[in-house]
Amino acid sequence: MSDAVVLENVTKRFSNVLAVDGINLRIPQGCIYGFIGPNGAGKTTTIRMIMSILYPDEGRVTVLGNDQPALVKDRLGYLPEEKGLYKSMKVWEIAAYFGRLKGLSARDARSRAKALLERFGLGEWMGQKCQTLSKGMGQKVQIISTLIHEPELVILDEPFSGLDPVNMELVRDIVLEMKRAGKTVIFSTHVMAQAEQMCDYILLINGGQTILNGTLAEVKASSNRALVIDFDGEVSHFEGLPGVASYRNAGKQVEMQLEDDADTQAILAALVGKVHIHRFDTREPSLHEIFIREIGGEKQ
């Protein structure tokens, strides 16, 4: 399988800020690749270099086999983090306009715009001006504008922002459909559950550097197993348990990072009679927990 995107020792500086620090990355064709990391980690800067909006100070970026990514822009679809619509344009007009910018004929752009608007539940709004749309509706129109020309490589920067659960599922289904069609999808997100459900590969970046990179299975295997307990009672009883490296308290649920030699039966025995346990389950750590551990989250 060839690579849709290759980054080789890519570095980007802004004045005295090192935004991206020597990243190496290969993104196979036909996969979903998730970029995760805290605000200011370098995700958006990396995406903008892939899109040739920015250029690296050092290193090389290759996109769809071309080391001049600007030459393949019509084969890319990009949803930026900072989003905006021309408020005075009608909904179908702006979607068709972006299709025309990517080389579609006026007829094809109009036809595809209307079909996608219907699919996204915006059929009755297609003749309205964009200024009448809610934030979630506007987000859907921008996703439609990103996909209208059926790009080979789709880059979505925070695509779930502003969407309700129903429309998050719709976007998820469309991303998975693109993968089935052999397209490559890169998306950055703070929604760890979506990344865990959808991604074949994960890049965790912080301070412009790669912290973790690989298949979802490889990323999870790099971290110790987790113990999840659903409970009623005082969370203070989880302090100082044997074999527990750290834990995250979510109110009625605790997710623990276990040490290599942890005895789960000893942990259970230490809690019996102190809290009421509804679930006691050993499993791989969630992507959320890995994120918190690697980025330096503190025990709650």
Image (cartoon, rainbow, N blue to C red):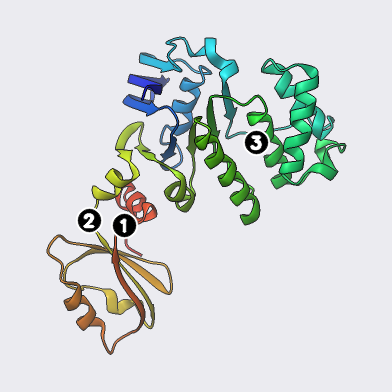
Q: Residue furthest right?
A: 127
Rendered residue at 38%/79% (across/down) = 231
Residue beneath the point at 55% across and 35% down: 178
Q: Can you say whether 243 is above or below 131 in the image?
A: below
Q: Which label is found at residue 143?
A: 3
Q: CA distance from mark 3 to mark 2?
A: 37 Å
Relative side of 12 to 107, left or right: left
Q: Residue at x 32, y 40 (%)?
A: 215
For the residues labelled 2 and 1, say whether their Cβ atoms are less than 8 Å apart: yes
Helix, strand or loop status at disc 1: loop
Per the image, the residue denoted by label 1 is 285
Badge 3: few (under 14), some or many (20 or more) residues near its Cα, within 10 Å? Answer: many
Inspect the image, locate mark 2, and give the three-letter code of the amino acid beneath it.
Asn
Instruction: Measuring from the top left, give residue 85's x and y in whole percent.
Output: 74, 32
Dot 3 amino acid type? Ile
Q: Which residue is mark 2?
A: 224
